[in-house]
Image (cartoon, grey):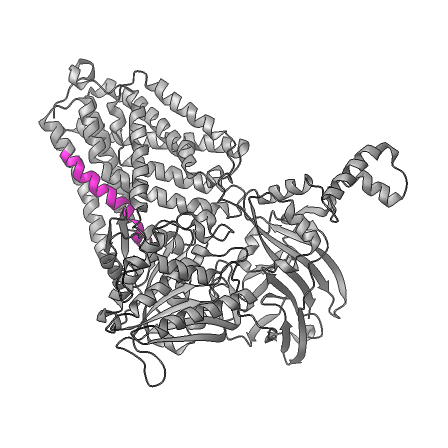
């Protein structure tokens, strides 16, 4: 490789004119778009007319859509409601209809079950369920049934047919239930049995903190299950992704049977580490049933998840066909795989797909070997570069200077974007890219690239005066420095077992970068390329690693941005910015160095021009809810909170609506909507003063007349003063849940910053907590209770000082949820998950250790939170009026709640 002074370089070594940077930027934007197009490609939807009735190997989207329509109905299917019960009946009819027309034996059951379990969410709790229902179909295989009613070896396929309030749940999880029903129908038409039974479970209470799957474990059919395929959704459309694995053999079967696999171990890392605050039935299969397999979910278009826009008409054609092709072939394969009969302990694998074209998977030991080899390969390309230039200290020294230049350009880019981020936090709305994900490019990616290119050229200008290397050599040197950094990072990560399943994020691009660098350096050595030829070579040969980086970025943003939109954080832009800066660094590393092929003439004009455009976009107040399918999430508790003395005499009562801070803007949106509505009156409003004083308010006549006319037009009876509006902040931290209704402990993180609007209480419904018996002996006291209430209840047990909970009648471990004022709090979530005319009471007993000196006093504070979920027919007129003043993009999920605070 020839060393040429840049000032004396021949014409063919001149750099590429800097305006062509704009063309390169546009090219990479096109590649990013093409990457998503390739990944989202869907098959043509197959109709019933395209396949014969007895065809057991072809999936019909048309048939699956019919099942989906029957399963969904036209209302949310909230566990415990009458509509949920009606649609459970319909689902049983669907399974029975398939069984009656099947070629192979299909058995169906409607399971009703009671149970309880401790679940260690981020806010742990005891989960108690009564009268829970699951609809089950079993396609009989060669393994059949045992004499005691249990099954032989069986494959479990699970979806859930319940939904959250005010969402029909077309994607979560109706779509997969429809696909599952069509898969059952097709497999039931086979002429020969599969090796294993296949159990199709439509569980009825996943949204009740995973109760439905736990209930199935009590069914005798669960005992023969050897593998599970869990079907879920955190979004809509696109192709579903594997994101949790506990049996690599099942993953391998997925790889073999799916021509366009989607799977990323990164998602499992984010999920299992708690960075993504969610969970699926897969946890129950793994932790309670010791049943292993894979978890598959839709993840794109997450803005519709758990909102009114999770509707079947928004499911694109081909989505169901793709999911059905995957599930039918996959289930058929594993149900005939005799190896699965040998049940293995829980294990995982390293897995990732490339643009949905193929899946790579290997075990942990292989991962360590592969990562070490790739890391050493990367280092060997550095040696190759030094050998081409010439083994001498000056070559090594200049390479180390180049490493410093790479680091400075990265740090400079990050610092620049951080400055812009700080300014945007102060002067712009949060989450503007909620409707337009592309905005992360001008907000974070492009500013990072522009600033890092500027720093890189500034550093290169300084070093060129010293070393005199030509542009191609300096570019190869910079790319070698990047590989040195990535190789070193990968080898360090090999010493950290906890990141084993995400090291492929370094290994994959580094492998290609190392291999391609040998090609490019050899070509440059053999032929003295012009700068534009070198640029073209590097750009084209780096495309595989560039597209992999774009794939990771697109999937992560599709998942991350909607999650941040419902995180309740004050500044959700910060984690989004942090992730996207990291992604920009990741992408830039695949091409780091090619910027040095561009001339510095006009460079600063080009870079500043691009930066100015980004800055203009940064401060345009794009609405986060401009897309009609993107809503602002609201959780409202229309509640009355009453506190009682030990003699059950009420001492305090307050009623109103708690508007929980889920979205960064929803509390301010509600405040603005109320203050700008006819419902709102100032504390010194003229109408109110005139009414209260019963005298003429002459000086306010004109204003009063206008307000009366507005009120009459809107038929207003609700009046909200400024003093009725209260933001919940740190001043209530000494109160359990800020003395607000608690649906689940996980909701506690949303209390701070919530808005409480004083108004009349919700429609009354029966609820009570009675102390049936209290007895003390020696240093222990036993308290027995009976709770009556609606389908959903929460009980919080807050022990007084120096008192310990030793045991209770619930068949779960005793573990506290949290500590408040150094007093342990225990939380019980209770659900009657299937509707009935009367709900059976919950009876429970607490056994406490109590010093004799305290036994005659107050031992424990217990709060009963009674909730009615999705009962719009019981909304009061005042509450309806409050709902009507909210903007169209507000997605309000309502809980009618009564909280009763007792002392025992």
Q: Does any portion of residue 44 appear in the rendered image? A: yes
Question: Which residue is at a point 11% across and 28% down the rendered structure image?
Answer: 525
Q: Please identify the quarter of the rendering in which residue 197 is found.
A: bottom left
Find residue 397 and report its horizontal and vertical position in percent: 21, 29
Residue lying furthest right: 695
Figure quadrant of the C terminus: bottom right
User: Which one is in front, 212 or 197?
Assistant: 197
Q: Does any portion of residue 728 appear in the rendered image? A: no
User: Which one is in front, 478 or 196?
Assistant: 196
Relative horizontal placement of residue 135, taking residue 460 as reference (left or right): right
Magenta residues, dominant SS class: helix
Relative horizontal placement of residue 687, taking residue 486 as reference (left or right): right
Relative horizontal placement of residue 308, taking residue 478 as reference (left or right): right
The region drawn magenta spans 496-519
Residue lying furthest top: 8
Tell whether position 504 is magenta: yes
Q: Please identify the quarter of the rendering in which residue 444 is found.
A: top left
Question: Which residue is at a point 81% across and 37% down the rendered structure image?
Answer: 704
């Amino acid at each position: 490789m020839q060393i040429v002074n840049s000032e004396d370089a021949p014409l063919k070594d001149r750099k590429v004119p800097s305006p062509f940077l704009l063309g390169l930027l546009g090219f990479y934007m096109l590649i990013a778009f093409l990457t998503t197009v390739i990944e989202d490609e869907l098959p043509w939807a197959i109709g019933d007319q395209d396949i014969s009735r007895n065809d057991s190997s072809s999936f019909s989207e048309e048939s699956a859509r019919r099942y989906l329509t029957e399963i969904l109905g036209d209302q949310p299917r909230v566990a415990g409601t009458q509509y949920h019960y009606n649609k459970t009946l319909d689902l049983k009819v669907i399974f029975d209809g398939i069984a009656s027309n099947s070629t192979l034996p299909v058995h169906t059951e409607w399971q009703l079950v009671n149970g309880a379990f401790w679940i260690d969410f981020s806010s742990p709790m005891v989960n108690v369920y009564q009268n829970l229902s699951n609809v089950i179909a079993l396609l009989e295989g060669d393994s059949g049934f045992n004499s005691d009613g249990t099954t032989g070896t069986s494959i479990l396929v699970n979806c859930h047919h319940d939904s959250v309030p005010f969402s029909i749940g077309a994607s979560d999880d109706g779509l997969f239930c429809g696909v599952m029903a069509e898969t059952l129908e097709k497999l039931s038409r086979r002429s020969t049995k599969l090796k294993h039974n296949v159990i199709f479970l439509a569980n009825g209470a996943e949204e009740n903190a995973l109760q439905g799957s736990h209930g199935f474990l009590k069914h005798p059919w669960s005992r023969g299950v050897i593998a599970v395929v869990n079907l879920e959704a955190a979004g809509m459309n696109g192709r579903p992704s594997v994101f949790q694995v506990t049996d690599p053999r099942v993953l391998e079967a997925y790889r073999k049977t799916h021509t366009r696999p989607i799977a990323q171990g990164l998602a499992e890392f984010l999920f299992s580490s708690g960075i993504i605050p969610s969970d699926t039935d897969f946890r129950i299969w793994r932790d309670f049933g010791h049943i292993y397999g894979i978890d598959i979910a839709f993840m794109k278009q997450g803005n519709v998840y758990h909102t009114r826009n999770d509707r079947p008409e928004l499911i694109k054609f081909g989505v169901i066909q793709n999911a059905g092709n995957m599930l039918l072939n996959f289930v058929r394969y594993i149900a005939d795989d005799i190896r699965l009969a040998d049940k293995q302990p829980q294990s995982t694998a390293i897995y990732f797909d490339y643009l949905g074209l193929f899946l790579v998977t290997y075990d942990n030991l292989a991962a360590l070997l592969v990562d070490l080899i790739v890391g050493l390969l990367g280092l060997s390309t550095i040696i190759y570069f030094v050998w081409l230039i010439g083994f001498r200290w000056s070559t090594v020294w200049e390479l180390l200077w180049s490493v410093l230049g790479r680091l400075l350009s990265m740090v400079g880019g990050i610092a620049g974007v951080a400055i812009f981020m700080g300014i945007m936090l102060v002067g712009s709305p949060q989450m503007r890219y909620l409707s337009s994900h592309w905005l992360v490019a001008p907000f974070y990616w492009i500013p990072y690239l522009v600033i890092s290119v500027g720093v890189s050229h500034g550093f290169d200008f300084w070093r060129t005066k010293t070393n005199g290397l030509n542009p191609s050599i300096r570019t190869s040197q910079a790319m070698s420095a990047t590989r040195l950094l990535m190789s070193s990072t990968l080898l360090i990560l090999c010493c950290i077992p906890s990141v084993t399943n995400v090291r492929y994020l370094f290994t994959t691009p580094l492998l290609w970068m190392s291999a391609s660098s040998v090609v490019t350096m050899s070509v440059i050595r053999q032929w003295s390329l012009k700068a534009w030829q070198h640029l073209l070579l590097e750009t084209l040969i780096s495309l595989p690693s560039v597209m992999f980086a774009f794939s990771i970025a697109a999937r992560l943003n599709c998942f991350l941005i909607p999650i941040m939109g419902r995180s309740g954080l004050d500044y959700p832009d910060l984690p989004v910015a942090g992730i996207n800066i990291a992604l920009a660094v990741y992408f830039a590393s695949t091409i780091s160095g090619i910027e040095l092929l561009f001339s510095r003439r006009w460079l600063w004009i080009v870079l500043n021009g691009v930066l100015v455009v980004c800055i203009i976009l940064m401060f345009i107040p794009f609405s986060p809810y401009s897309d009609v399918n993107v809503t602002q999430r609201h959780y409202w508790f229309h509640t009355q909170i009453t506190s009682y003395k030990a003699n059950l005499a009420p001492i305090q009562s307050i009623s109103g609506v708690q508007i929980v801070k889920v979205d960064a803007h929803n509390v301010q949106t509600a405040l603005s909507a109320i203050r700008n509505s006819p419902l709102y009156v100032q504390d010194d409003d003229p109408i109110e003063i005139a009414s209260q004083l019963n005298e003429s308010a002459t000086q306010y006549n004109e204003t009063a007349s206008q307000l009366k006319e507005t009120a009459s037009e809107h038929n207003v009876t609700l009046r909200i003063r400024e003093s009725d509006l209260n933001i919940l902040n740190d001043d209530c931290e000494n109160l359990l849940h800020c003395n607000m209704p608690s649906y689940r402990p996980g909701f506690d993180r949303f209390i701070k910053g919530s808005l409480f609007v004083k108004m009349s209480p919700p429609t009354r419904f029966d609820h009570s907590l009675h102390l049936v018996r209290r007895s003390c002996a020696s240093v222990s006291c036993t308290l027995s209770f009976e709770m009556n209430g609606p389908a959903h209840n929460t009980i919080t047990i807050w022990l007084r000082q120096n008192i310990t909970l030793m045991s209770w009648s619930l068949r779960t471990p005793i573990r506290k949820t949290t500590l408040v004022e150094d007093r342990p709090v225990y939380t019980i979530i209770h659900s009657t998950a299937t509707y009935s005319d009367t709900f059976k009471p919950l009876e429970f007993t607490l056994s406490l250790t109590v010093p004799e000196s305290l036994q005659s006093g107050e031992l424990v504070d217990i709060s009963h939170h009674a909730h009615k979920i999705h009962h719009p027919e019981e909304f009061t007129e005042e509450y309806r009026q409050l709902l009507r003043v909210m903007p169209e993009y507000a997605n309000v999920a309502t809980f009618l709640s009564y909280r009763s605070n007792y002392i025992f």
